[in-house]
Amino acid sequence: MGRNRKGSLVSFRPDVRVVDCTMRDGGLVNNFAFTDEFVKDLYLANIKAGVDYMEFGYKASKEIFDPEKFGKWKFCNEKDIRSIVGDNKTDMKISVMADVGRTDFKTDIVNRKDSVIDMVRVATYINTIPAAIEMLEDAKKKGYETTVNIMAVSKVGERDLDEGLEMLAQTSVDVIYLVDSFGYFCPEQIERLCDTYLNVGAKYNKQIGIHAHNNQQLAFANTIEALSRGVSYLDATVSGMGRGAGNCHMELLLSFLRNPKYNKIAVMNFVEKHMLKLKKEGVVWGYDIAYLLTGILNSHPSSAIQFIKDKREDYAIFYQELIDHAL
Amino acid sequence: MGRNRKGSLVSFRPDVRVVDCTMRDGGLVNNFAFTDEFVKDLYLANIKAGVDYMEFGYKASKEIFDPEKFGKWKFCNEKDIRSIVGDNKTDMKISVMADVGRTDFKTDIVNRKDSVIDMVRVATYINTIPAAIEMLEDAKKKGYETTVNIMAVSKVGERDLDEGLEMLAQTSVDVIYLVDSFGYFCPEQIERLCDTYLNVGAKYNKQIGIHAHNNQQLAFANTIEALSRGVSYLDATVSGMGRGAGNCHMELLLSFLRNPKYNKIAVMNFVEKHMLKLKKEGVVWGYDIAYLLTGILNSHPSSAIQFIKDKREDYAIFYQELIDHAL
């Protein structure tokens, strides 16, 4: 079972792309309240580090979300991105995420020739794939690179997943992402899922990506497992900053990749200057037993986020609460 | 390449044994200064959790190490263990570790019939295997279960390792351990090494064990990779407490294993009562970029431990220092 590994531990695969999601998934931790200095320094660090794509945040609907109540990176206005990157005359591309049903994509996503954004990533659940396809085709028509990220796939049956992947693979989308929203999967399961995604990808000439969460301290392990099976788009965040247990750490990922274009030092210097400060200021993310519990129960981390916010430590009680509500 | 996986994700393998090393590897963090209440509660928690072996510490030579300068679990006197466990009339077995060249094994390890200890684990480097064999045969003659733990194997050439494994497999030893002392390996390397160890084990009817470190957040991933290839003795520590980046977290491991004898709740309650307190008191272990750097450079964590003790945050400079000294 399973395909052979692709590539080796001492060489590199030219198809690999590293996507920094610090501001997008990390924005879910601090309500997108990054200082301009943070964003500018992250942009410069990512360029030095050889990161291929930097995701600035969401293209959220201002009809649904009040811009007064969120940091600007929940909306990623063109002028806000340009205030950091100018015309982005660099080799690094810029991406934004657009949630199905939460984006006024017809108006808020302009033609690529008028935008500094290069790639639009559409986040969907299995039951909103037709709506995702509408958004994907709109973005492609406007000239963008596109990805589709099927969230919470650990809750999706295998037959539904097969069908969803077939539907998506028949669109113009460039990359289909395997997303472990709840940090539920172990590497052996990732191996199997990669087989499914990569088979569809091979059939329709699509690249495959992975976005992992660290509930079981497996985000990095799952990312490199997927990589070695043939997945090429790899999401990571600096210091693993992301919702709940966070994501694959960029420092770990860049240390692992052998392409000399990647430079972990730039990221480490950014950590020294900014991420340690964030932690000291009380911004909380990363592995905790509470996230382990939501992870193994295949549940959304929101209850664990609340548990930690409430400074609770009664894990056994929390586990019983989760079982009562989740199963 | 590599063997198929052994067992499945929904069943369990009866050959699996969980070894709690919290006091032994964790003792390297706090100089073995555990309170009696901590030790007693850990003992009771491990019994409830279904842990198969609890390691109390080292059998260190009092000629070499001054008992005034270390907690008592560096020496594991019979009377000190008995003060916690009585005659240990439970299903959980008790182990101690003995370092080659640092143990007065002829005098300090008494016959098993006079001891509450069940298993002696001999820690050796590749170049001290003949001395390890002397200790292993002594312990076996005295009636103990034995393991041999070849440390720092990431520094050992493949031919030397093959020869060392052959030598050890021809002794009376019960279990041969794959030890990633520096947190250097990724799961793909663990897969290959397991192949080597398991082939020797199959030839001579020896069990294989794994002891992982978390420098790259891979201790749990490497442990379950080894498990799925056929390794049966699995080391873990509560909250991952262990030298430097620490070890595979017991909470994660017990959550993963499907044998109903294992009960993660007991461990979580212990974490709530004791481990959070240790952390608050300033005992420091666990993943940090400094350990990532020593890990990928295949170096002893001591310089990273000092870096963290000195409250340094200049990772890039530290990395250059490591390269100057390590390579």
Image: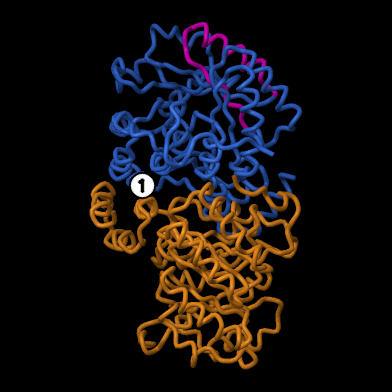
Chain colours: A orange, B blue
Q: Quadrant of residue A119?
A: bottom right
Q: Is residue B118 above or below residue B179?
A: above
Between B232 and B29, the one lying in front of the other is B232
Query: Which of B311/B293 is in front?
Result: B293
Residue A272 visible, this orientation: no
Q: Which quadrant, please, contains the C terminus of chain B?
A: top right
Left or right: B155 with respect to A60?
right
Q: Is residue B108 visible?
A: yes
Figure check: B200 above or below B270: above
Label 1, on which residue? B281
Q: Position of residue B178 (x, y in %)?
A: 59, 31
Residue occupying image coordinates x 69% and y 22%: B164
Give the side of residue A195 with respect to residue A125, left or right: right
- The x and y percentages for residue B219 are 52, 43
Give the number of callouts: 1
User: Where in the figure is residue B230, as x and y percent of width and height?
Assistant: 55, 31
- Give the residue type that dot 1 points to: Glu
Check residue A319 for magenta coloring: no
Nearer-the-camera pick, A324 or B87: A324
Q: Residue at x 60, y 69 (%)?
A: A19
Which segment did they paint magenta? B127-152
Look at the numbered disc 1 and give the secondary structure of its residue: loop
Q: Position of residue A142 (x, y in %)?
A: 60, 88
* Quarter where residue B78 is shown: top left
Q: Chain of mark 1?
A: B
Location of the N terminus of chain B (image quadrant) = top right
- Magenta segment includes B131: yes
Instruction: Tell me if mark 1 has few (under 14), some (14-19) or many (20+) residues whose alpha carbon lies within 10 angstroms of its own.
Output: few
Q: In this rendering, would B287 be left or right of A19?
A: left
